[in-house]
Image (cartoon, grey):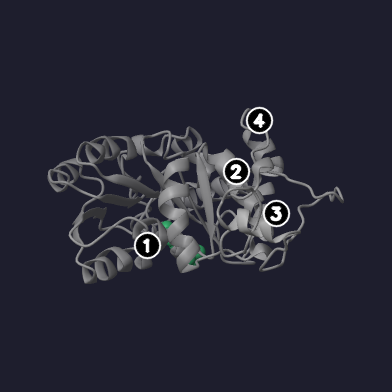
Amino acid sequence: MANSDKKASTDAHGTATKLVRGGLNRSRFKETSEAIYMNSGFVYDTAEEAAGRFKGENDGYIYSRYANPTLSIFEERMRLLEGAGGALGTASGMAAVNAALMSFVKAGDHVVAPKALFGSCLYIIDEVLPRFGVNVTLVNGTDLDQWKNALSQPTSAVFLETPSNPTLEIVDIAAVSDMAHKVGATVIVDNVFATPIFQKPLELGADVVVYSATKHIDGQGRCLGGIVLGSEEFIEETLFPYAKHTGPALSPFNAWNLLKGLETLDLRIEKQTDNAENIAEFLSNSSKVKRVIYPGRTITHRLNLQKLKCAVEVH
Ligand SMILES: Cc1ncc(COP(=O)(O)O)c(C=O)c1O
């Protein structure tokens, strides 16, 4: 955020290159792996330099609750991968979900979400927001008529997961985004299950994407982390002031772990998808299993999960 060098010219590179090189910003020591800037604050050569930085008149880091060089590399790598205008790393997936919503939703607003949500996301939408005077409508996410009814009034935000955790419900991001934009809503997609390898919600019409980086992005059970991605305007003007003052900041050490995780994301997802297909097939052939919910490999490989009508059911 505070570093003008970070937007390295890697927009044109392929996914595998972005996963390893995106946002790389070596120090003067020319380290191979990204440096971990495990510090809270930064020093200034002069009082004028400090004043300029605090006023936002010149580039440079101030305090790691606002921005940190290791975090900036992680944010830039994810920004490139997602094709977003901006990105902000957070301490966990839930910190990302909470900040994305709380940064702009206010009392009296209307928010729409599917019932099939990860439990903690449902808690924020259905327990926390109403406490602050937000009106919430929950719909069956696979039923576009229910979305249409819910989105027939002015709405501030739509929040959805697709595939949902844990029931793997598929929501049509493009259709819901179309309806949501007509009533003024910002569409936030929790893309944890699909990962940026299989689904790019911004390309399908969503405005904001959130991740629990704890899951596939780290992929090795080492740390918590999250990230919010969207237009440069949303990240810089709406989310950043909220995060800067409320403090869901990601630790530089965890940002580094997540960078290491990203390096192998495509390879791991490929293998996990193969494994999931084999397990789904095995379970489908078992007389002891009543129902297998499996959105399917061919769909996920084509980046068009939203076209899937429903999960495969086998009795
Ligand atoms: C879909 C979804 N969203 C958000 C979260 C929360 O992420 P974290 O545990 O990193 O806070 C999870 C965690 O399992 C999840 O599956």
Mark 2 Cα shell of 10 Å, populated few (<14), some (14-19), many (≥20): some
Report the residue marked by disc 1: 118
Q: From what the image shows, is residue 185 above or below residue 38?
A: above
Report the residue marked by disc 2: 270
- Numbered badge on residue 13: 4
Q: Position of residue 130 (x, y in %)?
A: 21, 67
Report, in whole angstroms, how far the alpha carbon at label 4 lies from the one at label 2: 20 Å
Dot 1 or dot 2: first in sequence order is 1
| Residue type highlighted by circle 1 | Phe
Q: Looking at the image, is mark 4 or mark 2 nearer the viewer?
A: 4
> Residue drawn 31% across and 69% down?
123
| Residue type highlighted by circle 3 | Lys
Q: Does the beta carbon of the residue at mark 3 sit less than 8 Å from ligand 1? A: no
Dot 4 or dot 3: first in sequence order is 4
Dot 3 or dot 2: first in sequence order is 3
Q: Does the beta carbon of the residue at mark 1 sit less than 8 Å from ligand 1? A: yes
